[in-house]
Image (cartoon, rainbow, N blue to C red):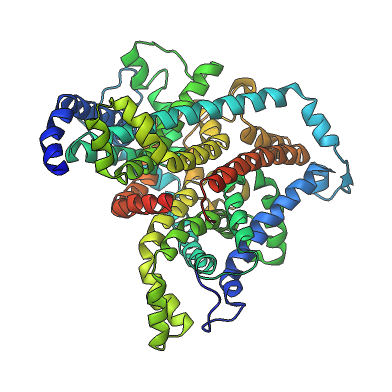
Amino acid sequence: MRPPSRHGSRWTPWLYLAPALVVLVGLLVYPIYQLGLISFLEYTQAQVSGGEPTSFKGLANYAELFGDGQFWQVLLATVVFAAACVLCTLLAGCSTAVLLTRIRAVPRLALMLAALGAWATPAITGSTVWVFLFDPDFGPVNRVLGLGDFSWTYGRYSAFALVLLEVVWCSFPFVMVTVYAGIRAIPGEVLEAAAMDGASQWRIWRSVMAPMLRPILVVVTIQSVIWDFKVFTQIYVMTNGGGIAGQNLVLNVYAYQKAFASSQYSLGSAIGIVMLLILLAVTLVYLRLLRRQGEEL
Amino acid sequence: MGTARTSVRRPRIRRPGRLAAEAGALLLAAAVAFPLYWMVLSAFKPAGEVQSTEPVPWTLHPSLDAFRRVFQQQDFGRYFLNSLFVAGVVVIASALIAFLAATAVTRFRFRFRTTLMIMFLVAQMVPVEALTIPLFFLMRDVGDAVPGIGLNTLGSLILPHLAFSLPFAIWMLRGFVRAVPEALEEAAYLDGASRARFLWQILFPLVFPGLVATSVFSFISTWNDFLFAKSFIISATENSTLPMALLVFFKPDENDWGGIMAASTVMTVPVLVFFVLVQRRLVSGLGGAVKD
């Protein structure tokens, strides 16, 4: 990293940054500002079509939202569901990564390719295929498990469980590949030395590998939190827009339904702002962790 | 001495569990691949077998009927090209823009550099879905001013995805740009290269592997997009993309599972091929980006 050299003026970096900044300000910063603005307005179909003037409502939308029992229920469901997804994804990803280091090239390639396949599968096709696998009439899963015509999407918890399986299926490969790359980067001598000192496999993982993998584990955990907190397509497609009577709603789908299905754009925006704030808090934690690790930004 | 000892020891430590581990890994691979196998299988099954209440994991009468339905009835080829076009533009544009930005933040020291980096990081966390509402109005207004890129056009899908893939792309490319030695830059200038020449003829080819890894992510997120396609393409169905076309086969009375699986296959296979092609670069790119 060197000071601006004779080869470029003070403005060169800004010239390079200009296209990125234009796009980001126009399509990210400005919409965020708009989102906040709409959340303070009266904004329904009447205002959108220009029939009625928009009026400032202050915090009334938030008051309405926080006074609604369903909002708190959805918020709780979102947090619990995301936490369960993150936990299962990390467990599956880390254990398969360790498994990859223990096996020879052919089974490793098989597992790697299968995982890449799951990873590459678009959320929407993954959702439809999993629903089909668990279909009460035509799916193979109920036959194998002897569940008869049990409908997974009918009950609240079984529907969430089905979506969780799909989410873990398509997101554990990212964790697996990343952690595997991290393990491979650990010098072999360190592990050999630990093994020679008589450490058990669990001890080696806990005392040698986990600390060395910490930065990577932080990255994949935060990424998973962010992805799983924002799940939209899977819930929308697998539970047909949020489940029976909205029993499988998460914040994202809830906001979408409020805004586009019932034209309550202000309420939808207020939910969006709540999500934004929660994710911002996660980001701040992440930044602190990065800083503590001495990472240079 | 260390190596001698480990070479003797190593097999004895690892052998006993290894066969079990390998068997487990193969089983796991089969389980993970099964949904994809079932998807492709169901796409090739004749209609009667797909809707059978005693499904079997093979078919003796493979048929292309479902694919024929998909491509003939639903104008699927057009949706496929739309998806490809949107994802292609986003990949190329975001790679070029992110390359310039990553170069700026790694090869220069300037005021607000750290602030910008934090902004890029924070931008990655923004819940894209929450922005659907303001983007909907933005695209509507833009469409009034510039008809080519408003609601109902492919532009309304390209622009937001460009914005959402940039922060991550910049963040990831940073490591690759930084890995190019300063000395090379000096040497290029001593040889009389201009800044632009260094940028495009030396730096760009060197960070190309990183661009590939980055592109995978922007390609996937754009190709997968369901929400924007659903929200922004309201009436101009000729500008629909694949995810929306897939939903056509869901019917209130009885889903056309064969059609859904065939459409899913068509939508998934290109991504799979892309993934397998860039697999090595992806894994090393991810390792490089994360290590950094």
Q: Nearer the viewer, residue B229 or B258?
A: B229
- Judged left or right of residue B150, residue A42 is right
Residue at figure coordinates x 58%, y 60% from the top left:
B155
Let me know if residue A101 appears in the view: no
Quadrant assignment, res A27? bottom right
Residue most toward the front? B1
Instruction: Establish if A286 lies above or below A31.
Output: above
Q: Is residue A161 left or right of residue A45?
A: left
* Residue B212, picture quadrant: bottom left
Q: How many marks?
A: 0
Residue at (43%, 65%) from the top-left corner? B177
Q: Does residue B253 show up?
A: yes
Q: Is residue A137 left or right of residue B19?
A: right
B288 and A199: which is toward the camera = A199
Residue nearest the viewer, comparing B212 with A11: A11
**Quadrant assignment for the C terminus of chain A:** bottom right
In this picture, residue A93 sits left or right of residue B196: left
**Residue occupying the point 57% across, 72% down:** A13
Reply above or below: B208 against A234.
Answer: below
- Considering every residue shown, the one lying at the far bottom of the view is B192
Give the image quarter of residue A175: top left
Residue shown at 33% from the left, 25% from the top:
A202
Q: Position of residue B116 (x, y in %)?
A: 62, 60
